[in-house]
Amino acid sequence: MPELRKDPIVDRWVIIAKERGQRPHDFKPEPASPGSGFCPFCSGHEGKTPAEVWAIRENGSAPNSEGWQVRVVPNKFPALAIEGGLDRQGLGMFDMMNGVGAHEVIVETPNHDWKVGDATEEELSKVLWAYRERLLDLQKDLRFRYCLVFRNYGQAAGASLAHPHSQLIAIAITPKRVKEELNAARDWYLEKERCIFCDVLRQELAMRDRVVLENDHFAVLSPFASRFPFEVNILPKRHSHDFTTMTDQESVSLARTLRETMKRIEVTLQDPPYNYVLHTAPNAGATAGPPRADRWTTLECDFHWHIEIVPRLTKIAGFEWGTGFYINPVAPEQSTRFLQEAIIVEEETPTLSHPR
Amino acid sequence: MPELRKDPIVDRWVIIAKERGQRPHDFKPEPASPGSGFCPFCSGHEGKTPAEVWAIRENGSAPNSEGWQVRVVPNKFPALAIEGGLDRQGLGMFDMMNGVGAHEVIVETPNHDWKVGDATEEELSKVLWAYRERLLDLQKDLRFRYCLVFRNYGQAAGASLAHPHSQLIAIAITPKRVKEELNAARDWYLEKERCIFCDVLRQELAMRDRVVLENDHFAVLSPFASRFPFEVNILPKRHSHDFTTMTDQESVSLARTLRETMKRIEVTLQDPPYNYVLHTAPNAGATAGPPRADRWTTLECDFHWHIEIVPRLTKIAGFEWGTGFYINPVAPEQSTRFLQEAIIVEEETPTLSHPR
């Protein structure tokens, strides 16, 4: 069973996934081209993954056979175990519990060479639908306080397989950085009775210096204090704490916004490795833990879901990880301009200002 | 002038070093062997760096000429500017100030191929002496709240030059992660009247599961909730909040401890890239800012300096940077055993238990 351990000084939980049993010589420089061999995520190789937990199959094909469009399977090397109780315990001054959780892979398409920036609206909508359905399903498990959706693209961003996929982790804690956002947003709301993300949106849409693109439903912003070059956030313009409450119209709009954002990044930076992470509200139903400490009640007013996208252009050096203090060599106003000026040939949708 | 910008939601300052003026095409995949050409840090090339600010020269040689043993120069591409006022200002709801600070390079030896694990005690003692002297000198500048010493080794750890060197950054803010440690240690002390780091040391030295090595003055521990495989911390066994207050005997002992630790990492993990960062007390004399908010007073009792060492074996993926929640595939008890069992040929000092 993997363990969750809490640092006794800083309020940070870590997964110790010792079942992976890596030994010193396992940490070798990686091969130049990841996934250049056999791909377990390609159509026809369904037997090479754990049995699927969810899929979009419009042609009546059987589970774990060909004919799917999006397919969700448990991670073959999960960092967490799905069965078992939390079994919280102290070890002297240290806190730990069982590494209980879900670790799933969302295979976004049967097409090995598909890219988000070249996808159709329909394809990307199906990926977003998978995110939503898996979030709603996993949040029924009241052991899980937080469900985290993220995408690693490219070897430098931590992707071990080249086939297009996202991942989902459901865990019994709220991650540290998400909790900091939740607490800061709550404190702001308690003082001002306004959402801090809505305030940022209003100021940025008025100033225009860091708006990469904007449409009826979404804004793509370069954060004022960007940690990394060309970092951008996608925020819904309508206040909403929970990704799963998106309307169908908003979901189509998000698919288009995500595609255009990724296309601009791809063109401007020559198809860079990147990560994106969805920050949505914690699991409102989770019963574990004190009501306020982990903030799983009354988030509707003060949290605002968003997607953080970070192209991996610079190496994170000792200075950064050791201090939480980042050096960014590109001002967000500059990166905004470069992304705005990226030339994109749009086949079907000439502008995003008026989504259908 | 570089800028310091504060994220309006999370309490995190970022250096926007836009003077570096990087454009999208500057972010290319890097060459396989860094620093394979001309080395500005080698003896004889003193004219290729900014003028030295400090050096150990025992033979009466002139500044900026050959004959040095350790040499400190300003970074040629500094992330901060040394001249100017902080000029704090708000931009709507955003906070910013001038990126005033020092960014120095400590060239540790004239020998291009020197390694910490193979150094003599005398050589490493001189590097530690340089750290101490530069910290004491920069802390006289009361604009600087925090001075950060760190070492990047290997390209994957962010080193852009192969020649052995550390870096020092002096800034007008206390970095986020250091501040979290300071605040947590203060809260623990207010409750228990004990240093939390001393409590961790006592428990670890009693349990022995995560003690990589121990001598009269220092303990090398794998943190209970290690974020990264083979992460270790060096802590002084005597409670002390400030690196610069080390005695001469402790300094020699630290040189030996650091050498042995790095040698064990080098042997166990086949000379991996790594970072280390010194966490010492903030600048007690700094006058900027409210007395408690940034914790620059009365740290003597509750903070405990230490060095954090992280071999860079895994890629930090989207999950980690997006959440502050880490997956570590090696339990710290396992990595401790591997490091303990590393075979090291010690030429002069067969054991570290009884430093001379």
Image: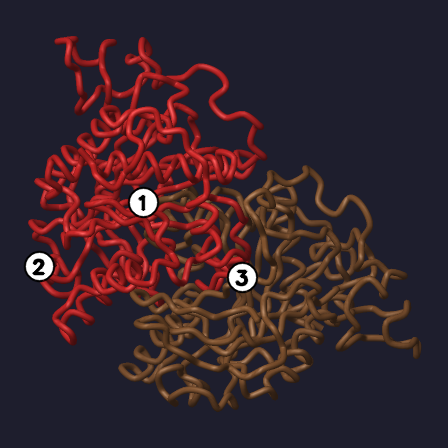
Chain colours: A brown, B red
Say which amino acid is labelled 1: Val
Within 10 Å of the Cα at label 2, are there few (<14), some (14-19), or many (20+) other Cα atoms?
some
Say which amino acid is labelled 3: Phe
- Residue B97 at least partly seen: yes
Above or below: residue A232 compared with residue B310: below
- Give SS at disc 2: loop
- Give SS at disc 3: helix
Camera-side residue of B109 and B232 = B232
Query: Nearer the N terminus, badge 2 or badge 1?
Result: 1
Q: Is residue A12 left or right of residue B95?
A: right
Q: Report x, y in % for residue A126.
A: 75, 72
Q: Report x, y in % for residue A120.
A: 77, 62
Above or below: residue B331 compared with residue A125: above
Q: Report x, y in % for residue A150.
A: 59, 64
Q: Are marks 2 and 1 in contact (CB under 8 Å)?
A: no
The residue that appears at 64% across and 41% down in the rendered structure is A30
Within 10 Å of the Cα at label 1, are there few (<14), some (14-19), or many (20+) other Cα atoms?
many
Q: The residue marked by circle 2 belongs to what chain? A: B
Q: Which residue is mark 1?
A: B277
Q: The residue marked by circle 3 belongs to what chain? A: B
- Give SS at disc 1: strand
**Separation (CA) of disc 2 from disc 1:** 22 Å
**Separation (CA) of disc 1 from disc 3:** 23 Å
Camera-side residue of B69 and A243 = B69
Q: Which residue is mark 3?
A: B319
The residue that appears at 61% across and 59% down in the rendered structure is A20
Tell me the tag on residue B297.
2
Within 10 Å of the Cα at label 3, are there few (<14), some (14-19), or many (20+) other Cα atoms?
many
